[in-house]
Amino acid sequence: MPSDERVVSALSALRPAIGRYRVAASDTLERARAMLAFEPGPSRTRAALGAFADGRIDPERFALVSSGADPLDVTGREVVEHIVELLEDILGASDDQFFVPVGQAGGAAEAIRARLAGLGTAHTAARILDLVKRHSYDLLRHGSPSDGYPFERWTAAERALAPPLVVRLDGSGLDALELAPLVDGCVRLVLIVDGPAAPAPLARLVSPGALIAQVDDASLLAGLAEFDGPAVIAVMQGQEARFVHDPRAGSAPWKRLRVDRMPTVPPRKTLGSRSAWQQRDDLAHLKALVEPPSLAHSAAGAGNGHADPTDRLTAWLIEQSGQAGVA
């Protein structure tokens, strides 16, 4: 188990999401076990029908009709047995499998994708079970259950059940643009950031449906289980900006975004892949998102017919009162 208290707290807070993933994997495991345990056949059918069937019902034909499918062939049984072993390993492992340490030389996105591909076995196993049941499974076409399941191939339903991950990484390696393709479904990424990072590395991930935050501790994670959507939360230790973008807080960006701290000194040196100019631009982007519209902007929007009806009415009343432009 990781010794970092930040990692321990994050894994504890994510336990409800981990539990949902485990339930889905457990359901698939039970399906696989049931396929191995229930093999419809003439002998089972003859015993179930009893003496009434003697001379009246062909057990072999009745078995096929009542089961709706042929019994598993040798290859199908081996595949299902392999799936059982894989899912038992996943469900028997500790929560450490949801923790991804990233070395200074490695990329966070690459490490996250590799772990998701491994945990995605629970998703691809369900798909393969359906193919085996229909006698449509082909190893060359559909791959082995142990091949891993790349995130790019996950369906919308599978992304909604994505396992959460706690990722520990060096601050210089935090690049929002690498993480952007993973912000989908209900993917939850908690980034434990060591060392200095760009001042607003996650600002570029802010979008209407994603919970994005840079915080001091894991206290924000307590309510994460109630959020229905993707989330990326960085737990940071340096002088970087601190903000929370919560889609549940309002319809406009400045309503959804709360900035608690901005750096006092603008960046002047390249850090990781972000130049000083890019870091300053990230801060400018964050500042622009949090600024509410001014009355002058509302009045201009009213003239173009693009402002909110309430804003247009307010601007018109001010104009009629002769107080426009008065501080």
Image: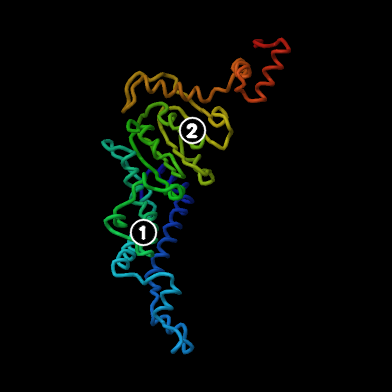
Q: Report helix, strand or loop for mark 2.
A: loop
Q: Residue at x 42, y 41 (%)?
A: 190
* Residue pictured at 70% horizontal, 15% vertical: 318
Q: Residue 96 in the image: x percent, y percent?
A: 36, 51
Sequence-first disc among 1 and 2: 1
| 158 on left or right of 105 | right
Kindly identify which residue carries mark 1: 128
Vertical comparison of 69 with 293: above or below: below
Q: Dot 1, crowdedness within 10 Å: few (<14), some or many (≥20)?
A: many
Mark 1, secondary structure of its residue: helix
Q: Is residue 35 above or below residue 153?
A: below
Task: Please give left or right for residue 177 compared with residue 288 in the image.
Answer: left
Which amino acid type corresponds to the residue marked 1 in the rendered image?
Ile
Circles 1 and 2, Cβ within 8 Å, touching? The answer is no
Q: Position of residue 240 (x, y in %)?
A: 42, 27
Mark-to-mark CA distance, 1 and 2: 35 Å
Q: Could you say which is closer to the camera, residue 5 or residue 318?
A: 318
Residue 1 position, x and y percent, is 36, 50
Instruction: Work out whether residue 25 or residue 320 is closer to the camera in this orientation and state it.
Output: 320
Neighbours of disc 2 within 10 Å: few (<14), some (14-19), many (20+)? some
Residue farthest to the right, as pictured: 321
Kindly identify which residue carries mark 2: 207
Dot 2 amino acid type: Ser
Q: Position of residue 58 (x, y in %)?
A: 42, 83
